[in-house]
Image: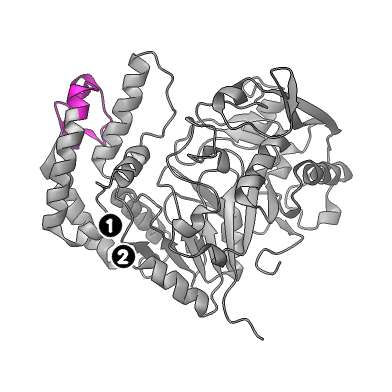
Amino acid sequence: MTRTNGRNVVVVGTQWGDEGKGKLVDWLTESAQGVVRFQGGHNAGHTLVINGVKTALHLIPSGIMRPGVKCYIGNGVVLSPTKLLEEIEGLEKAGVQVRDRLRISEACPLILPLHAVLDVAREAAREQHGSEKIGTTGRGIGPAYEDKIARRALRAQDLKHPQRFAAKLRELLDLYNYVLLGYLGSAKLQFSDTLTPYLKQGELQFDAIYDEAMRQAEAVVPMLADVSRELNEAHRNGANLLFEGAQGTLLDVDHGTYPYVTSSNCVAGNAAAGSGVGPGMLHYILGITKAYCTRVGGGPFPTELDWETPGTPGYHMSTVGAEKGVTTGRSRRCGWFDAALLKRSAQVNGLSGLCITKLDVLDGLDELQLCVGYELDGERVDILPLGADDIARCQPIYETLEGWSESTVGVTDYARLPVNARLYLQRIEHATGVPIHLISTSPDRDHTIMMRHPFLA
């Protein structure tokens, strides 16, 4: 019997984000008719390089760079109308059609200026009280998810009903201003120029927030849709769908290095809940992982190296890999590849295969270290522990492999990789138990080695 339904692939990061998911999603959309973003907000960032031109995306799925591909923002995403419209305008200036190809779930919780104000104020208060900062991006992601879970969120569908929007907003501001003024001392805090228009002596102003939201509603409402229904219909009509995760598995609010995590579920299972499809529609899970490790912000990092001193392997990774965050511009901490960490990611995602990115960054290193486990309180463990405190006490156990001097930049044939590069990849497969199906050898869309295609596997 001929199968009429489409085939669907989920792409997730397996480390702490910044693994290069955007390029792979863009590359895979050659075989897809729709791309779905299912969690996170504009704290994420994907950089695409197409024909040498760099494009940074934060909310809109990477498939937007492929003409004719439909893009969906699912209910699991917290949506900033301000940042969405800024991103659309930037893409349109570059000649990319967006508005007629982008569908946004009406159930998306909205990120409003009040959320960013609370985010910034909380981090400032932690610092003033001598507590360690979480390392949020200050974009209001966490507070928006809190409102969702507390069942008080303003959602995208509320933009269609001004009176309802106003009533919910007033109720939210009563709570937020009580916390900001009475607990966080917002009247004494300094806020950025982008937030001060919504504040007066530390208090959030209803009119400024409401008026801006209603102006934005005119542009956003035409793109709202029942995304769950549209995705299920597309699947039944034979469309291949690509589900694009943001951040990485170790930033997942349940399975990551809590509390140094994001506020959503980054794992593959959330592709179903965050977009409104059944788990049976997720056919292949592709885990994206760098050939080394990086992390932005605070939190434990067992294989972290000195990445600021010239001449060290960590500095080589940082500079050759251009390791700065797409969204924040913060430098990423760098370290050796961690197979024990990847085992945890493989377990919670049910990975079908791996894509190794930034292999070319390791070109020129004489020697490589690969973490295969840890020593924790005198015992050996071969998988990343669940608690941040335990992870912070882990001492990595390394295997040493020979590096390579030949360039891998732009290689598209596995057989043309240096012998030691192939041995390194084979050791990763063996240590993690997950087959490598794709290898990225530069940021460019076409510099990809494909051993097994996720849409055909």
- SS label for mark 2: strand
Q: Nearer the viewer, residue 8 or 213?
A: 8
194 lies left or right of 281: left
Residue at 31% over, 61% down: 106
Disc assigned to residue 156: 1
Q: Residues within 10 Å of mark 2 (few under 14, many from 20)?
A: many
Residue tagged 2: 224
Q: Position of residue 297 (x, y in %)?
A: 50, 29
Q: Quadrant of residue 394?
A: top right
Residue at 57% over, 77% down: 5
Is the C terminus in the top left, top right, bottom left or bottom right quadrant?
bottom right
* Tag 2: amino acid: Leu
- SS label for mark 1: helix
Q: Position of residue 104 (x, y in %)?
A: 36, 62
Q: Position of residue 43 (x, y in %)?
A: 42, 42
**First in sequence: mark 2 or mark 1?**
1
120 lies left or right of 450: left
Q: Nearer the viewer, residue 369 or 412?
A: 369
Q: Position of residue 75 (x, y in %)?
A: 38, 57
Q: How many marks?
A: 2
Q: In this view, which residue lies farthest toward the bottom? A: 1
Q: Nearer the viewer, residue 34 or 180?
A: 180
Magenta extent: 179-203
Is the N terminus in the top left, top right, bottom left or bottom right quadrant?
bottom right
In reply to whether residue 8 is colored magenta, the answer given is: no
In reply to whether residue 194 is colored magenta, the answer given is: yes
Q: In this view, which residue lies farthest toward the top? A: 130
Q: Is residue 354 above or below residue 248?
A: below
* Tag 1: amino acid: Ala
